[in-house]
Image (tube, rainbow, N blue to C red):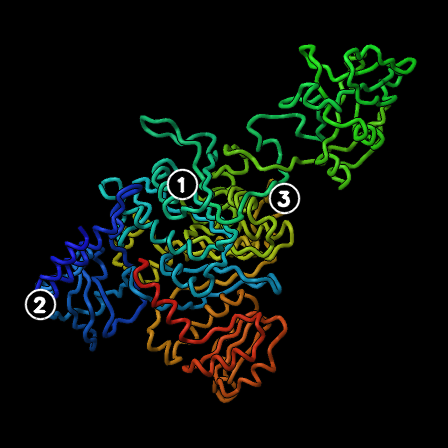
Amino acid sequence: MADELDGLLARVDDPALRADLHAHIDRIRAKRTFGLVFESHLPERVRLPEHPIRPGAKVAWRDDPSSATYQVLRARAGNATVRKVRHLDGSRLSAEEDAEVTEDELPVADLVVIADFGEPIYPGLRALGSIDRGADKPAHLVIKGENHHVLEALQFTHAGTVGCIYIDPPYNTGARDWKYDNRYVDDADVYRHSKWLAFMERRLLLAKELLNPERSVLIVTIDEKECLRLGLLLEQTFPDARIQMIDSVINPKGATRGSAFGRTDEYIFFVMTGEAAPVPLPLDGEWKVVQDRRARGLRWAELLRAGSNTQRADRPNQFYPVFIRDTEAGPTFVDVGAPYYGDEKGEISPPEGCVAVWPIRSNGSEGNWQLSAGALRTAIDAGYTRLGRWRGGSTAITYLKRGEQRKVEQGVFPIVGRKADGSIVVDESNYAPVFVPGTQWRISSHNAEQGGTNLLKQLTPNHSFPFPKSVYAVEDALRFFIKDDPGAIVLDFFGGSGTTTHAVARLNRQDGGRRQSIVVTNNEVSAAEAESLRKQSFRPGDQEWEALGIFEHVTRPRVTAAITGLTPDGEPVKGDYKFTDEFPMADGFEENVTFAELVYLDPDDVELDLAFVAVAPLLWLRAGAQGPVIDECLDAAGRRKPYAWTDGYGVLFNPDRWRSFVEKLPETATNAFVVTDSQAIFAGVAAELPDHLDVVRLYENYLTTFRINEGLG
């Protein structure tokens, strides 16, 4: 059938029509027959109000979210000559329509530059400030920008290296809490589920390329509105991963919903790649759905075998008597008999004053002990076996399995004495069981009101944000996967109020880790704020508008307050942290944070080395975001230096000075960037550098990375 279609298409004389037909048929062929089916071709684009309007740029009407797309042909004297290239719905013009399009003269002030997803973009970063309290630790990065394009930028800096991604995407409740193609999506939009899936798939595909394929985890929170669709999308996007869903109570009071049960919980998907798995942690009883008193201390197991292989015939050499005696201090061990293979165990006479305890099951049948006779003698001598209340030949015998013995030997349970039977007595007062919990979490610290909303009010009293996550809930979810990785990179591209950076800082404080978070958020204002601002004649890009955006009004102030311990007004943050690590919030954290904004570069400027200041932070980020950024590096005469090194990386601007560059290589460096048009010169310099260095050619590697991103939108 496919060959027949191709043959028919070849007979179409009009090349433009033939190309259009090919494109539409290929799109139909690409649609999935099974699984989650949705309109994945729906367009998205981002508006860039600060970007200059110049020839070649694509623009739209600034105040019309549904605007068609135009290309700028000329721009001068406050006006731009433009030509329409896309319809209101984002579709391209047909060949006939394109032939009939005329040029229009429009005021530059009424236009805004746009970038369509799926087309190559050339990103840079503009520094917006920093907090330096962490000495030589890697800096956390908080980026203002469209997360799809930031994810593309991170392909250059972090492809295949991220150990953990935590995201709290829009829940698509119909409450106008997110935008698609610059328009808020509400419950009146019949395509809202399809738009949400397209929106998520584009970002998840990019995120997948950043995750370490050998060991990494993607954590996604969601509620019932999109839970089922998200689960299918994750299975399709990560077919080789192990996926589990957790039910987590975040609002014990319940959020009232008309004609429905009150919502108390949300869901957390854990997508585990490679060897990633939750590690056992010391957790309190809240993490147990069913309380087991024995799990709260040293666990003594029954010596009589239960479960499978419980009959005497299953372990005949483990059918033997244990001789015990009752004393004023309590029952004691006297001896362990040899395995008995006869039919009349009564013929075995206990020592004087003793009774024999045999492995007899509750139904009277003969069973077997868990240990051989020799192993039991060793355990008795070590104090790892004990007797229950005296009941003669039916006295219970318990022992410590090897895992519990190790806890004693490692000092988890300090020995403080011994009983009459020689069994050890331990101090259990400071013990927290170490385990991986089940899939139902009802943890008081995960309450979104206390650990989220109220905590945010303490940090930024005059800045509000709807439904922030409890920092303790995020912290706990991360801990299961990065507890044993003190240098983990944690990415959150739905950054919201900045909870993930806050949680990673808390984890670092608890164990001295050097984990780094990269958090991405746009600077959107809410639907209500947008309406109010427009009534005041403000528009995106105006200072009054941007000041109320998520990044400027919530994320940056919250992260700053958390790290410095000072509110935006300069007052010490009131209150203490609770639960895992209790200390005054005013203490802040010994961490470094860099705030930056995504900018869009002209590839010609990049290739001509005219955009290095914006590319420089990406080099620093690729090298580990540690220490200073190598920017222009000018000498006293204002000329760029031939090369520069920090402890972590270096840039060679003048390949003729490669010998000095190589000689000055610090032992701690991990990356080197060589600016040259010549592959031969680059290869020669790279050959002189140690094999452990990540050596990158600028700007060929940079430009190629973003050219191959074309179509990922």
Q: Which mark is residue 99?
A: 2
Q: Position of residue 184 (x, y in %)?
A: 27, 48
* Gap between marks 3 and 2 measured at Cα: 69 Å
* Gap between marks 3 and 1 measured at Cα: 29 Å
Q: Could you tell me the amino acid type at mark 2?
A: Ala
Do the residues bearing badges 2 and 1 touch, measured as CB atoms within 8 Å?
no
Marked residue nearer the N-terminal end (3 or 2): 2
Report whether residue 225 is seen.
yes
Is residue 111 toward the left or the right of residue 684 in the image? Answer: left
Eye-nearest disc, 3 or 1: 1
Q: Is residue 251 above or below residue 15?
A: above
Q: Position of residue 306 (x, y in %)?
A: 66, 21
Q: Secondary structure at mark 3?
A: loop
Disc 1: which residue? 222
Q: Secondary structure at mark 1?
A: strand
Is residue 316 toward the left or the right of residue 691 in the image? Answer: right
Disc 3: which residue? 582
* Gap between marks 2 and 1 measured at Cα: 47 Å
Q: Position of residue 709 (x, y in %)?
A: 35, 63
Q: Residue at x 36, y 37 (%)?
A: 228
Eye-nearest disc, 2 or 1: 2
Q: Could you tell me the amino acid type at mark 1?
A: Ile
Q: Residue at x 38, y 30 (%)?
A: 256
Eye-nearest disc, 3 or 2: 2
Marked residue nearer the N-terminal end (2 or 1): 2
In the picture, the quarter occupied by the C terminus is: bottom left
Image-quadrant location for residue 83: bottom left
- Which residue is at the front of the view, 575 or 216? 216
Q: Is residue 379 above or below residue 476?
A: above
